[in-house]
Image (cartoon, rainbow, N blue to C red):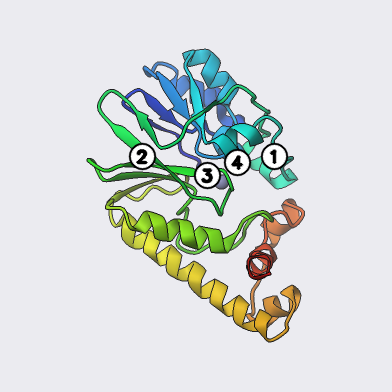
């Protein structure tokens, strides 16, 4: 699985995972980076903040929530550590809200909690660009982290779909056309998933029973390597938590 960092008009969006730090520096080290923004605290976006800040000697911005979390980020699973590498704490992020200005562009910063409580996306209305962090990733989602909220993700996607955009600069799966249609598709998937789980929950079923009633299956390798940290049962539990 790829994690993307984006460079636009002196701005670097996200810092990639720790595991690729030397390649990353080799690839982007010569770019005229004047500011960096981190979309959320997950290790595949925040793994190289210290390295890149020192290299480019520039401010690194993040949402107020992200700045707080990055002072002492939560531990990650074995699978995440193997895939991405660990993410060191970083206490010197600069809080940013509302907008970020570069020489030729003004990016609106939109909070989109759900996948991560601190996540923001960057919207450039003139160009109709959406730097969407992990809001999209794919229209079908097979597993989630234990802290994710599906209800919040649905709300966040609905809010973003009110914007006019074409290109989805996704953190993992960029879409250069039909970005909005694909994000709508994800919204439909999440709404359907939520409704299906909620219907059984209201009938009195518990998480495991709902899981088997709906004939869900875990991706065994992901489940096993992550010690259940990344799982489909987390998605069922997320709905129940949202309803409680
Ligand atoms: Zn993420």
Q: Quadrant of residue 93?
A: top right
Question: Spatial distance from mark 3 to mark 2, Cα to Cα?
Answer: 13 Å
Q: Which one is earlier in the sequence, the residue at label 2 or at label 4?
A: 4
Q: Which one is earlier in the sequence, the residue at label 1 or at label 3?
A: 1
* Residue bearing mark 4: 42
Q: Which one is earlier in the sequence, the residue at label 4 or at label 3?
A: 4
Q: How many numbered discs, if any?
A: 4
How busy is the neighbourhood of tag 4: few (under 14 within 10 Å), some, or many (20 plus)?
many
Q: Which one is earlier in the sequence, the residue at label 1 or at label 2?
A: 1
Question: Spatial distance from mark 1 to mark 3, Cα to Cα?
Answer: 21 Å
Vertical relation: 51 (above or below) 121? above
Q: Which residue is more in the foreground, 194 or 43?
A: 194
Q: Which mark is residue 81?
A: 1
Image quadrant for the C terminus? bottom right
Q: Which one is earlier in the sequence, the residue at label 3 or at label 2?
A: 2
Q: Residue at x 70, y 62 (%)?
A: 220
Question: Spatial distance from mark 4 to mark 3, Cα to Cα?
Answer: 9 Å
Question: Spatial distance from mark 1 to mark 2, Cα to Cα?
Answer: 32 Å
How busy is the neighbourhood of tag 3: few (under 14 within 10 Å), some, or many (20 plus)?
many
* Residue bearing mark 3: 119
Q: Are marks 1 and 3 in contact (CB under 8 Å)?
A: no
Element type at mark 3: loop
* Residue bearing mark 2: 108
**Of discs 1 and 4, which sits in the foreground?**
4
Ligand 1 within 8 Å of the CB at mark 3: yes
Vertical relation: 117 (above or below) 72? below
Q: Which residue is more in the foreground, 71 or 1?
A: 71
Question: Spatial distance from mark 1 to mark 4, Cα to Cα?
Answer: 11 Å
Question: Spatial distance from mark 2 to mark 4, Cα to Cα?
Answer: 21 Å
Extreme residue in the right direction? 227
Residue 22 percent location from the top left of the image: 55, 22
Q: Are marks 1 and 2 in contact (CB under 8 Å)?
A: no
């Amino acid at each position: 699985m790829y994690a993307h960092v984006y460079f636009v008009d002196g701005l670097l969006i996200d810092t990639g995972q720790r595991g690729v730090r030397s390649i990353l520096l080799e690839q982007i080290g010569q770019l005229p980076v004047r500011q960096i923004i981190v979309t959320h605290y997950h290790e595949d976006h925040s793994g190289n903040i210290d390295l890149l800040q020192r290299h480019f000697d520039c401010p690194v911005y993040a949402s107020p929530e992200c700045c707080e979390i990055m002072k002492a980020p939560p531990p990650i699973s074995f699978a995440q550590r193997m895939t991405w590498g660990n993410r060191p704490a970083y206490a010197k992020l600069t809080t940013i809200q509302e907008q970020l200005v570069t020489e030729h562009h003004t990016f609106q910063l939109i909070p989109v909690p759900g996948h991560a409580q601190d996540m923001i996306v960057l919207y450039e209305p003139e160009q109709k660009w959406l730097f969407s962090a992990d809001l999209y990733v794919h229209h079908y989602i097979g597993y989630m982290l234990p802290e994710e909220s599906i209800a919040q993700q649905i709300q966040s996607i609905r809010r973003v779909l009110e914007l006019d955009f074409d290109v989805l600069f996704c953190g993992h799966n960029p879409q250069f056309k039909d970005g909005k249609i694909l994000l709508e598709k994800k919204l439909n998937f999440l709404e359907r998933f939520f409704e299906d789980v909620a219907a059984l929950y209201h009938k009195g079923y518990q998480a495991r029973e709902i899981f088997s009633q709906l004939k869900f299956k875990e991706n065994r390798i992901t489940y096993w390597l992550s010690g259940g940290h990344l799982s489909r049962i987390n998605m069922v539990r997320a709905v129940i938590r949202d309803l409680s």
